[in-house]
């Protein structure tokens, strides 16, 4: 809570300066401060919960424009902590929480959500207008997180959660060694396989990555080059900020501030043919109807087929999850989905 209070003060001070001095570095500073606010969420909440709490268009505006309302939110957070002795997250200090004003971290997977409204009355108009939409979305999200299945306000289809048994594995040791080498000589590259490289450079050095992609060493078809800072700059709710990574402490802050740029080269063709015997990744770059996304086709027992999103590519590129870990989670996701379809069809029949 003390950290969030200091964070709110710094954001508000910067907002006051920004109103008189329209400088991009001030906007960037506020953005990064809220990325540090996101780190609090990643400390206390399950990644799945964070993604659900993000699913809402919310213009948070300036904290200084909220006046007494934000002060009341801070005071309520203090009261909750004093009474329950549980971590409380203040949504306006984050990018990744767009549902509710306070999140009580009683359970990483099923947190409590509080919406703060001044002068709110319990009458027939409570569930109307913007306030009603907010409360309906909050109620639906809470039900989904608790039961794993719910219709959330504003969405056409019902949400359904599939719980995987696998534990994700990451390349943090390799990332750490690359960063250590970069700190010594200015840049470093590590070949994980013929389809994957992790590299880093100091921010003042020009990277010539093509020099490290010798055709004789790799089997790239259409490699994707990703910078860790894209996920920071765009504040994706899918991946933890670098400050939460399992690497040397001082590198966490250098990556957050962009003093070191971490690069990841990966070709999704590496996942083609990945199998566990009953499920196989049979195609890549498959168009997903109704979107601009291209995903993976998974075949189950040469019969059932599923198309999975390219978010699995991003897990490797930006989340530094291992290829085997991601491949196995894709296969298990498809198998669980198949089982769920059979279960629901049996229930309906």
Image: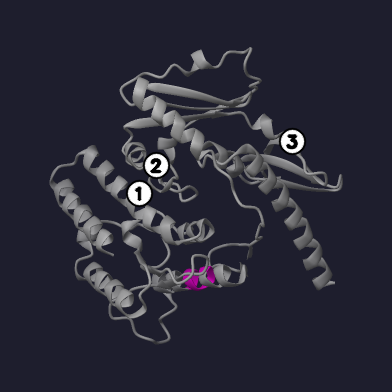
Task: Rate crowding at label 2 as few (under 14), some (14 to 19) or many (20 or more) other CA atoms within 10 Å.
Answer: many
Give how far across and how far down residue 317 sits, in percent: 53, 36
Split into 4 quadrants, where in the image is the N terminus? bottom left
- Which residue shows up at 41% across the image and 25% down it? 181
Q: Which residues are magenta?
A: 136-141
Residue 242 in sight from this viewpoint: yes
Magenta span has 209?
Answer: no
* Residue 201 showing in the rendered view: no
Residue 96 position within the rendered picture, expressed as x and y whole percent measured from the top left? 41, 55
Principal secondary structure, stretch drawn in magenta: helix
Cα distance between the residues tagged 1 and 2:
7 Å
- Look at the image and tell me in which quarter the C terminus lies: bottom right
SS class, disc 2: helix
From what the image shows, is residue 108 above or below residue 200? Answer: below
Q: Determine which residue is flagged by label 2.
A: 232
In the rendered image, residue 147, in percent from the top left (x then y), is placed at 61, 72
Left or right of 296 in this view: 123: left
């Amino acid at each position: 809570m003390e950290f969030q209070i200091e964070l709110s003060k710094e954001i508000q001070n910067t907002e006051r300066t920004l109103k008189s001095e329209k400088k991009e570095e001030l906007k960037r500073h506020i953005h990064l401060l809220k990325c540090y606010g996101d780190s609090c969420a990643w400390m206390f909440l399950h990644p799945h919960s964070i993604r659900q709490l993000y699913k809402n268009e919310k213009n948070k505006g300036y904290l200084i424009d909220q006046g007494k309302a934000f002060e009341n939110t801070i005071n309520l957070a203090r009261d909750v902590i004093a009474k329950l002795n549980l971590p409380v997250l203040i949504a306006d200090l984050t990018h990744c929480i767009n549902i509710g004003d306070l999140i009580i971290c009683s359970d990483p997977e099923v947190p409590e959500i509080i919406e703060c409204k001044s002068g709110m009355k319990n009458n027939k108009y409570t569930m109307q207008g913007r306030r009603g939409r907010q409360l309906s979305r909050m109620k639906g999200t809470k039900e989904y997180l608790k039961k794993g299945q719910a219709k959330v306000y504003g969405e056409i289809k019902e949400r359904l959660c599939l719980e995987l048994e696998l534990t994700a594995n990451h390349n943090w040791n390799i990332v750490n060694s690359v960063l250590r080498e970069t700190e010594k000589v200015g840049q470093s590259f590590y070949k994980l396989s013929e389809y994957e490289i992790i590299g880093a450079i100091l921010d003042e050095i020009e990277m010539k990555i093509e020099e490290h992609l010798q055709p004789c060493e790799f089997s790239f078809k259409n490699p994707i080059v990703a910078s860790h800072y894209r996920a920071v700059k765009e504040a994706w709710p899918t991946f933890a900020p670098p400050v939460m990574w399992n690497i040397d402490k001082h590198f966490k802050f250098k990556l957050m501030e962009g003093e070191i740029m971490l690069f990841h080269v990966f070709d999704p063709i590496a996942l083609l043919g990945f199998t566990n015997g009953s499920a196989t990744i049979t195609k890549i770059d498959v168009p997903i109807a109704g979107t601009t996304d291209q995903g993976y086709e998974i075949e189950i027992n040469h019969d059932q087929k599923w198309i999975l999103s390219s978010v699995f590519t991003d897990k490797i590129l930006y989340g530094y999850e291992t290829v085997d870990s991601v491949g196995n989670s894709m296969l298990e996701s498809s198998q669980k989905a198949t089982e769920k379809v059979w279960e629901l069809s049996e229930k309906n029949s």
